[in-house]
């Protein structure tokens, strides 16, 4: 009898556990508070907001600030993309998601940036902070200083990667603003966030946001984040025509639910945003010059001198007053006037004599020899006038460059726009044109000289952007 009752009792226990898992697990996943914020990226106008100023756990959205400072450090010359970074034991020991870096190995700074942006690698983010500021604490101070300069008034950072830590908090509004600054302050690096995969030096990595990038038309970034305390977070940006919208969600219950909510918010943003609006880029960060050691590197501002202090006398010396020296002279003012008149008369006379002497001693040119034959055109030959039938106004601008072939016209146009923003200096004045081919759509910049096309291609290749020159038609 005891054996016969054991199976139903055990079966009942299993059923109870299964029901408990079905009920408790969804509740724990939904425990993270929800917040959302949507803006027109061109103007910064708020299109939708819910709990946007509630301080929540940002998770890996934190890496947006880590990357912003990395771009800033490269621009200022603090570090280069090719700098070899030695991985510390602290960075190598970070929990997943990670690139798999080993303590003591070296890797180029550019690969750390790619891994943090695309793979959301915690070890790469920590290595970035240590390479720039030397320690996690010092880099966190710089993150907070930068956040304050960007107007992120309700954000406090404690680490570079976003793993849950007491006091490490932000808001949907602040993260949306940070995403807008990444877009407009460093457009040359923004394409990182749209790559579905990239070479991170030690291996190829896939984008944590690849599902939304593939599913939503116009999506090209920016960053995902997840921890148990934060839920599923995402800052997403999309562009359609002349419109660009940024949407942020905190506290999603799953990747699928979060992406669906972000897609709804982006659709709402495109419906509410005007079709055309001026692009008012956000102001560049202005850092306060403080000496408390928490402001990172000091920036000195050169201004006009308002006052000049008198130098302090050397000890043991007495000042010599020039006014105390009274000159003595016996020359009268009438004598000075007479002397000036005589000097002027003498100088004029001497100048006249000198001019006559030079004229008298000048060498006269010799008479041309009678036997010298003058060059002239033959009398029997007449020169026909040269007729110009057409003047070229192109200035030799028959060259161009190709930046890839793509499966759709839309994608080719997006690549052209992104590339133009990336390399404004050398592509300014060129014509963006998509050419349809049997194999796809070519993205071309036309109307360039040979030298400007060569320069633009070399600069793009230095940024790891594929490019080749297009010659004039034969």
Image: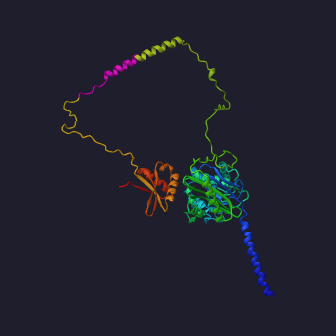
Instruction: State the image quarter where residue 310 is shown.
Output: top right
In the image, 32 versus 84, the foreground residue is 32
Locate residue 224, reporting x and y percent.
Answer: 63, 61
- Is the residue 452 above or below the residue 11 in the image? above
Name the outermost residue toward the bottom: 1
Magenta segment: 349-367
In the image, 101 versus 98, the foreground residue is 98
- Magenta stretch encompasses residue 362: yes
Q: Residue at x 48, y 14 (%)?
A: 339
| Quadrant for the N terminus in the image | bottom right
User: Taking the image as drawn, is residue 126 in sight?
Assistant: no
Name the outermost residue toward the front: 271
In the image, 346 versus 93, the foreground residue is 93
Q: Residue at x 57, y 65 (%)?
A: 205
| Quadrant for the C terminus in the image | bottom left
- Is the residue 22 above or below the residue 223 in the image? below
Locate residue 336, reporting x and y percent.
Answer: 51, 14
Q: How many marks?
A: 0
- Is the residue 339 above or below the residue 159 in the image? above
Locate residue 320, reporting x and y percent.
Answer: 64, 25
Instruction: State the image quarter where residue 444 is shown.
Output: bottom left
Locate residue 463, reporting x and y percent.
Answer: 51, 56
Label the magenta part by its dominant secondary structure.
Answer: helix
């Amino acid at each position: 009898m005891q054996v016969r009752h054991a199976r139903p009792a055990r079966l009942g226990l299993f059923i109870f556990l299964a029901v408990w898992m079905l009920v408790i697990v969804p509740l724990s996943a939904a425990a993270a508070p929800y917040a959302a914020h949507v803006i027109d990226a061109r103007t910064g106008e708020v299109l939708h907001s819910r709990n946007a100023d509630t301080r929540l756990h940002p998770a890996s959205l934190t890496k947006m600030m880590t990357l912003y400072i990395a771009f800033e450090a490269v621009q200022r010359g603090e570090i280069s993309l090719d700098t070899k970074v030695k991985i510390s034991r602290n960075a190598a020991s970070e929990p997943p998601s990670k690139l798999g870096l080993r303590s003591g190995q070296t890797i180029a700074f550019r690969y750390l940036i790619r891994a943090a942006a695309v793979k959301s690698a915690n070890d790469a983010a920590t290595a970035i902070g240590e390479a720039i500021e030397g320690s996690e604490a010092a880099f966190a101070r710089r993150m907070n200083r930068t956040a304050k300069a960007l107007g992120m008034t309700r954000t406090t950072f404690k680490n570079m990667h976003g793993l849950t830590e007491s006091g490490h908090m932000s808001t949907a509004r602040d993260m949306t603003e940070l995403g807008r600054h990444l877009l407009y302050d460093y457009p040359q690096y923004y394409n990182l966030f749209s790559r579905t995969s990239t070479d991170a030096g030690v291996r190829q990595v896939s984008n944590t946001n690849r599902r939304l990038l593939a599913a939503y038309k116009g999506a090209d970034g920016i960053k995902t984040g997840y921890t148990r305390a934060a839920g599923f977070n995402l800052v997403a940006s999309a562009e359609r025509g002349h419109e660009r919208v940024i949407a942020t969600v905190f506290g999603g219950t799953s990747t699928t639910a979060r992406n669906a909510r972000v897609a709804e918010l982006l659709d709402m943003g495109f419906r509410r945003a005007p079709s055309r609006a001026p692009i008012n880029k956000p102001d560049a960060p202005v850092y306060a010059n403080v000496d408390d050691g928490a402001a990172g590197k000091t920036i000195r501002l050169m201004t006009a001198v308002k006052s000049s202090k008198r130098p302090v006398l050397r000890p043991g010396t007495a000042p010599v007053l020039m006014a105390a020296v009274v000159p003595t002279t016996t020359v009268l003012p009438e004598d000075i006037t007479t002397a000036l008149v005589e000097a002027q008369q003498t100088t004029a006379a001497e100048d006249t004599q000198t001019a006559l002497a030079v004229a008298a001693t000048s060498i006269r040119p010799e008479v041309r020899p009678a036997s010298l034959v003058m060059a002239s055109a033959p009398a029997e030959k007449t020169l026909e006038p040269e007729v110009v039938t057409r003047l070229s106004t192109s200035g030799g601008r028959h060259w161009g460059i190709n930046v890839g072939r793509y499966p759709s016209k839309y994608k080719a146009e997006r690549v052209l726009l992104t590339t133009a923003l990336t390399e404004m200096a050398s592509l300014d004045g060129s014509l963006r044109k998509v050419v349809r081919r049997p194999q796809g759509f070519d993205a071309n910049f036309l109307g360039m000289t040979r030298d400007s096309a060569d320069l633009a291609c070399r600069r793009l290749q230095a940024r790891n952007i594929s490019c080749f020159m297009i010659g004039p038609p034969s």
